[in-house]
Structures are given as C-alpha cells and as structure tokens.
C-alpha cells in the first residue's frame, strides 16, 4: 500500500476490538478496525472505507438478525450461532471485554436458519455460543438452553445436532437429559474444566468447583454411558503448585476424556492474571504441559480402543485426502472414521461401518454387512 497499490487493509477480531483507535495511530495505512460483533455489517463498513474514511467499529453493538452466516465446513455440516458475547470475567481471558455482553437470538430465527440449511442439503448442525448454557437468560421471559435443544432437535430432516461450548457453572443437568431424550442430539459433550484445583479455579474466576464439574460428568455417564466427553484445560496458571497440577491430573484419571485441548498459561494484555507476581517459569509450564499431554494421548487411545469390532453410524463428510479411494466421516461421538467408498455417492449419507482398526485419534473400518445393526450401549436400569 505504501508503494501505491490499491488495497484495503482490515484488522478484525478480539485484539482489534481492544486496541481500536490506537491501531490507526500506530499503523496509519489501516483502513478498517472492527470487532467481532460487526462481522455481519462488513459490507456497510467497506462502503464507508470506499468513500475515503478510516473506520473504527469497536463500540458495543446489539446483534442484528441479518447476522453473517457462520463458516460452513462442508456441504454436510453447518454451524449456527445461538448466543453472542460473554458475561463471565475469567481472569485469564480477553473475550468478555472484546465481544460484548451476552445476546441470545430468538428461537424462531434459529429454527428458521436450521430449516433453511436442511433445505440446502445440510444433515448436521452445531449450535454455537461462547457460553452456550447462558442461552436465554438475557431474554424476557427467560428461556432455557435445554428447551432450545429439544425444539431444534425436532426439526424435520435434521439428522444430527451438536453444541459447544458448555460452562460447568451454568450447564444444567437438564441439558444432559435433553440430549438423552432428543433423537437427533449426538452423545457428545464439550465441557471445559480448565483446572482440577479448587484454589486455581477460584483464582481463575471460573465460578465452579471440581465437585460441580464431576457431578455433570456423573449425570452424563448415568444417562449416556457411551457418550464422548471432551474439555479444555490450562496448566501453569499463576500460583499453580505441583499439588494443584496433580489435582488436574486426578480429574483426567477419573473422567478419561476422549480429547482435551491443553495449553500452558500465557498472559493476555489487560487481563488481571497477566499482572500477578506469581507467574510460573516457562520450564515448569512446559513440563506440566508435556505430562498432561502424555495422559491425554493415553486416554484418547483407550477410549477409541473400545470401538473395536463395533458397528457405528458414520455421517460421511469428505474424501480422505491421503487416500482418495476412502471417505471420511464422524460418529455421533465425534470420532473420525475412514473407510473405502466413493465420495460422490456417499457424501451426506449415514453409513453403518464396522470398526476394524483403532488409532489414537481416528478409527478405520469397512461398510457393515446388511443386517448388522449399530452397537448400542444402554444405561443401567
């Protein structure tokens, strides 16, 4: 641009939201600075830029129902936002100060979008929210996320329904019941617990205890004993002792997650924890990250090994890019499965597959013979 090329420079996202006008002062060539809540209005903002203006769109904004469609990962699976923003104040997180307050979309508009997606050929929908269990608490009258799950799950033509991300502080046991009682809902839960230490959870401002998290896991295992449970966890948070870390490993051992997104704590600008004097050394953080990742891998392998010789239902999404004669799809648990097949014939189809190989983070198999039914693991009576 400094050489005279006709380009438009846009900085968008959470950091852009936080920095705002200061970005223009540091880099005058920037044309547009915008927060995430303005994504659905980018065409209007670019028109303003085309008229010769530098634009900063970072003010708090109420969502508009012409919201931009979330990214469609495939022709089979789609994402649908149901709530924007976050009211939490976790001491390590920049999101609440950049994405604004929680704003739930009307049930009717969510259902209409799902119906439109189904008419376009999508088979699976994932409902999205930074704190999805808070859905409806900003409405008058208030609504429950568990009720939304049931309503969306009844949409004709919807084969599969998922949702992320749950918060242990707000996730009601009714959500577990709704998944168990809604045929389209997948037996999959993503519930970040972040730490197994109550002292660290308090320092993080999470608003829940390890006991609360484990009670949610117990309910899932009671109602849906074969369900997949995944999580997020941070190690090396300021002030974390070796015992605090061992408490986290203890939760890992109790639950045996299907997958965990792990991270060593890193300070974020303008967050409380970044200024604390109790920061851990990189050496300690990386050691704990290595140890927890080793345990994650062990449990992931163990969880997938139980699928050996079982018949599972796979929603076919794409070709296996490493082996074009195979297709790739997922089970209701979210496990990736590869098997021989023609993608042009099978894309978007539900196929029963017998598992013949179990790897740490994927499964492989062959199309089940006619009459072989999906293996069901039912709760104890």
Image: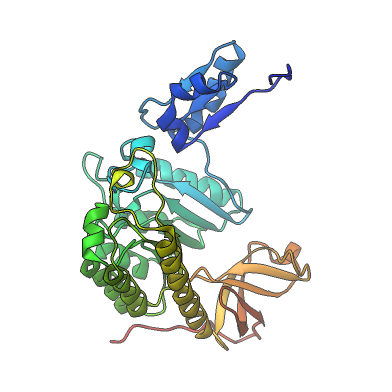
**Front-most of 13 and 204?**
204
Residue 223 picture quarter? bottom left
Residue 286 picture quarter? bottom left
Q: Residue at x 54, y 27 (%)?
A: 42
**Quadrant including the C terminus:** bottom left
From this viewpoint, is residue 371 visible?
yes
Q: Residue at x 56, y 83 (%)?
A: 311
Color scheme of the displayed model: rainbow
Q: Residue at x 56, y 18 (%)?
A: 28
**Quadrant including the N terminus:** top right
Q: Is residue 116 above or below residue 233?
A: above
Residue 216, x across and y down, in percent? 27, 69
**Front-most of 69 and 51?**
51
Residue 347, x across and y down, in percent? 68, 62
Residue 147, x across and y down, in percent? 30, 55
Q: Is residue 242 above or below residue 95?
A: below
**Front-most of 63 and 12?**
12
Residue 19, x across and y down, in percent? 43, 29
Q: Residue furthest bottom?
A: 309
From this viewpoint, is residue 258 visible?
no
| Number of marks in the rendered image | 0
Drawn side of residue 265 relative to residue 328, left or right: left
Drawn side of residue 356 relative to residue 106, left or right: right
């Amino acid at each position: 641009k400094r050489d005279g090329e006709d380009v438009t420079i846009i900085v968008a996202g959470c950091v852009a939201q936080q920095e705002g006008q200061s970005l223009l002062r540091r880099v005058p060539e920037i044309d547009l600075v915008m927060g995430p809540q303005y994504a659905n209005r980018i065409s209007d903002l670019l028109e303003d830029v085309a008229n010769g203006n530098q634009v900063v769109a970072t003010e708090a904004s109420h969502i508009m129902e012409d919201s931009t469609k979330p990214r469609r990962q495939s022709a089979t699976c789609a994402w649908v936002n149901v709530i924007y923003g976050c009211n939490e104040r976790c001491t390590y997180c920049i999101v609440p100060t950049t994405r604004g307050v929680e704003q739930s979309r009307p049930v009717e508009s969510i259902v209409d979008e799902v119906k439109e997606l189904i008419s376009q050929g999508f088979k699976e929908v994932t409902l999205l929210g930074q704190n999805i269990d808070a859905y409806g608490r900003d409405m008058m009258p208030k609504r429950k996320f568990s009720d939304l799950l049931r309503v969306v799950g009844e949409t004709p033509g919807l084969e599969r329904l998922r949702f992320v991300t749950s918060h242990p502080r707000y996730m009601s046991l009714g959500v577990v019941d709704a998944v168990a009682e809604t045929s389209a809902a997948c037996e999959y839960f993503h519930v970040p617990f972040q730490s197994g230490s109550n002292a660290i959870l308090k320092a993080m401002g999470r608003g829940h205890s390890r006991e609360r998290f484990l009670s949610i896991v117990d309910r899932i295992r009671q109602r849906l004993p074969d369900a997949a449970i995944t999580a997020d966890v941070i190690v090396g948070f300021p002030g974390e002792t070796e015992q605090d870390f061992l408490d986290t490993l203890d939760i890992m051992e109790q639950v045996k997650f299907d997958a965990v997104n792990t991270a060593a704590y890193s300070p974020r600008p303008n967050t409380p924890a970044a200024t604390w004097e109790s920061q851990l050394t990189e050496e300690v953080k990386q050691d704990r990250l290595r140890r927890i990742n080793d345990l994650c891998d062990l449990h992931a392998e163990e969880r997938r090994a139980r699928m050996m010789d079982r018949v599972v239902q796979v929603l076919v999404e794409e070709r296996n890019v490493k082996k074009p004669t195979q297709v790739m799809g997922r089970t209701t648990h979210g496990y990736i499965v590869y098997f021989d097949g023609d993608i042009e014939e099978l894309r978007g189809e539900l196929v029963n597959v017998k598992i013949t190989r179990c790897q740490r983070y994927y499964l492989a198999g062959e199309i089940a013979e006619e009459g072989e039914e999906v293996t069901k693991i039912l709760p104890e009576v």
